[in-house]
Amino acid sequence: MITFEAVRKQFPDGTVAVEHLDLELPTGQITVFVGPSGCGKTTSLRMINRMVEPTAGRVTIDGEDVRGKDPAALRRGIGYVIQHAGLFPHKTVLDNVLTVPKLVGRGRQRQVALELLERVGLPAAFADRYPAQLSGGQQQRVGVARALAADPPVMLMDEPFSAVDPVVRGQLQEEFLRLQGELGKTIAVVTHDVDEAITLGDRIAVFRQGGHLAQVGSPRDLLTKPADDFVRTFVGRDRGYRGLSFEGLDGLPVRPLTDARAAQLVLDGDGRPVGVDGFRAGDSLRTVVDLALTSPLGIAVQVDDRGRATGIVHHHDVVDLLEERR
Ligand SMILES: Nc1ncnc2c1ncn2[C@@H]1O[C@H](COP(=O)(O)OP(=O)(O)OP(=O)(O)O)[C@@H](O)[C@H]1O
């Protein structure tokens, strides 16, 4: 667990970047720092690995004040990923990744680095290229591989996926979450993008101007119970719709396949719907809303684990359920 206890940071020019920050980053989870530009997210992140020192208060990792640790030793246990990846331009991809294992004197270095590249989705053929020969998304992958190279328990990521287009960003986020599912590291991510915060965060800390923490909670908390107008506005007007991602399907009437509206539904020989995606019992209400409202038939199709149609939901039943829950 990483904790900020009454942390304040005032720079020598008088700027107060962070004001009385109390925050816990649970072990093995992703905590996202989100907020408008200049509200102290990066400064807070950098106080974890002592790139910035607090003016007051303390930052601890597993109960130990980071100021009691040698900065170089501290940083070996903390991976750091920044926007644009921050790769060494004159080193190959492999050497970029190897920079860190060399620091910790790890054996089998080349093999480890190649495995890491593969883990982040880069084939070995990329190992001998230079950063300029990679796309932005590929560079970010190398940055993540480098940060993981020393197998640090803690990762700090500052706008890690901002420099790439939305499609690539979505892929990187998805792959990153899959990787985290295997690795279970304690991760702090800075972003100004609410969607990214909701996608990545187990916990989200919303910062406001002046380095104040406006709210901390799960994505669901922020969407359904914003603490004040600032959070409500920042999280956005479509938060009600986004919040449906966290709502289940209790009370949704599923009608049998004999229903008149199912007449136009085409099923293959195994009973799977053709040309439309189905939803499963454990899916979110948002999935069903999306399917029902975009379907030309005005229905969402429920399927079982093998993808076979088991029932349908009318779009007006979905809308009625939304009304009921308001
Ligand atoms: N070394 C410094 N000296 C003086 N002021 C600084 C310094 N570093 C940051 N600041 C100021 O502290 C405030 C917080 O900066 P910080 O970079 O932490 O914000 P941020 O929320 O990460 O913003 P962004 O999303 O734009 O990166 C800003 O007003 C910034 O100008």
Image: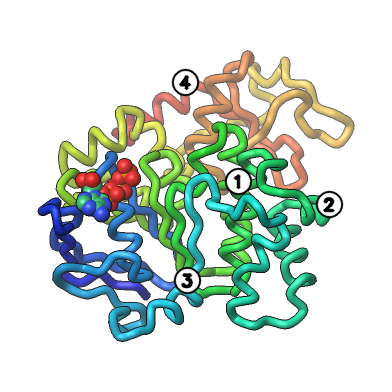
**On-image quarter of the N terminus:** bottom left
Q: Is residue 206 visible?
A: no
Depth check, mark 3 against mark 1: the one in front is 3
> How is the model colour-coded?
rainbow
Mark drawn on residue 125? 2
Q: Position of residue 317 (x, y in %)?
A: 47, 25
In terms of secondary structure, where does tag 3 sit? Answer: strand
Q: Is residue 128 visible?
A: yes
**Kind of residue at disc 3:** Ile
Q: Residue at x 66, y 53 (%)?
A: 90
Badge 1 density bin: few <14, some 14–19, many ≥20, Cα 10 Å = many
Q: Position of residue 82 (x, y in %)?
A: 48, 52
Label whose residue precedes the other's in the sequence (3 or 4): 3
Of 284 and 162, nearer the camera is 162
Q: Which residue is mark 3?
A: 78
Please state if 274 lies on the left or on the right of 262 as rendered. Answer: right
Q: Residue at x 38, y 83 (%)?
A: 70
Mark drawn on residue 172? 1
Q: Position of residue 229 (x, y in %)?
A: 16, 37
Q: Residue at x 18, y 61 (%)?
A: 9
Label whose residue precedes the other's in the sequence (1 or 2): 2
Of 113 and 272, nearer the camera is 113
Label whose residue precedes the other's in the sequence (2 or 4): 2
CA gap between label 1 and label 2 equals 19 Å
**Kind of residue at disc 1:** Leu
Mark drawn on residue 316? 4
Contact flag, marks 2 and 3 (Cβ < 8 Å) = no
CA gap between label 1 and label 4 equals 36 Å
Label whose residue precedes the other's in the sequence (1 or 4): 1
Q: Quadrant location of residue 22? A: bottom left
